[in-house]
Amino acid sequence: MRTPELIDQVRATMVLLIGSADELRDLDQVLGDGDLGITISAGAQAVIDVLTDAESIHEPSEMVKACAKVFANANPSTMAALVAGGLLAGSKAWAGREDIDVAAAAAFLQAAADNISHRGKSHVGDKTILDAMVPAAQALAQCPPGQDPLEAAIAAAAEAVVSTRDLQSRRGRASWLQDRSIGLQDPGATAFLRALEAWRDAASGTTGPRAAVVGD
């Protein structure tokens, strides 16, 4: 996927992702401070706006850097800062690339996850966005020939999101709940899953299944 196509795909994905804002708000009101829906919707809209007039963007890494900047500035939340930092780290994996393939996407996700882990002092199992990001990156990188890498990533993230219900939150405001956080689905991991599903739906032009809804 080259830059013009990538820009169109990201914009369409962000339009669809905004539709998950209410769900993410509701999840975050139970487990966090309730601002995740605003963070996602404001950040997504900022990305849409910056990519609407993007003639000066010629490389995928430049596009990601522009998205990271506006996402961080759209809302002064910890999640916005972590996501923006992850995007900037991912952009380095695309430096000098003109065409993004599955391997590049996997490298991007892994670099972003590593940065979020370092900056947020968190790891897989701490009940954060990483619990969905890392399995998705691994699924992309290890997808066998003949299988759809994106569907493999979505399946891995969906399974991980469900598994977060059994975990105790160890980072952020959710950690204040201690063992009361067990049984609740992590909002950040769910947001990442919804972003993957939005990417799929934007690419296909149809709405696919939405996984791991609370109460399933």
Image (cartoon, grey):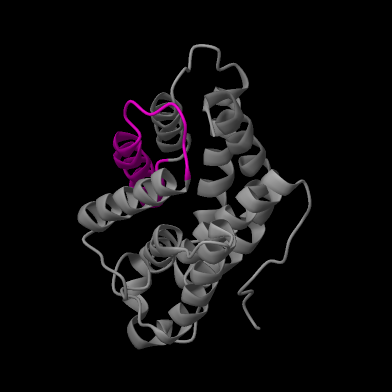
- The number of callouts visible is 0
Looking at the rendering, the stretch of residues picked out in magenta corresponds to 76-101
Residue 28 percent location from the top left of the image: 51, 65
Pick the quarter of the image with the N terminus. Answer: top right
| Picture residue at 38% right of the left edge, 83% below the top | 167
| Picture residue at 46% right of the left edge, 40% below the top | 75
Dividing the picture into quadrants, the one containing residue 196 is bottom right
| Picture residue at 52% right of the left edge, 26% below the top | 3
Q: Residue furthest front?
A: 145
Residue 18 percent location from the top left of the image: 65, 47
Secondary structure mainly formed by the magenta segment: helix
Pick the quarter of the image with the C terminus. Answer: bottom right
Residue 81, placed above or below residue 154: above
Dividing the picture into quadrants, the one containing residue 5 is top right
Q: Would residue 47 be seen by someone viewing this image from the given angle?
A: yes
Residue 109 percent location from the top left of the image: 38, 51
In the rendered structure, the answer to whether residue 157 lies left or right of residue 25 reads left
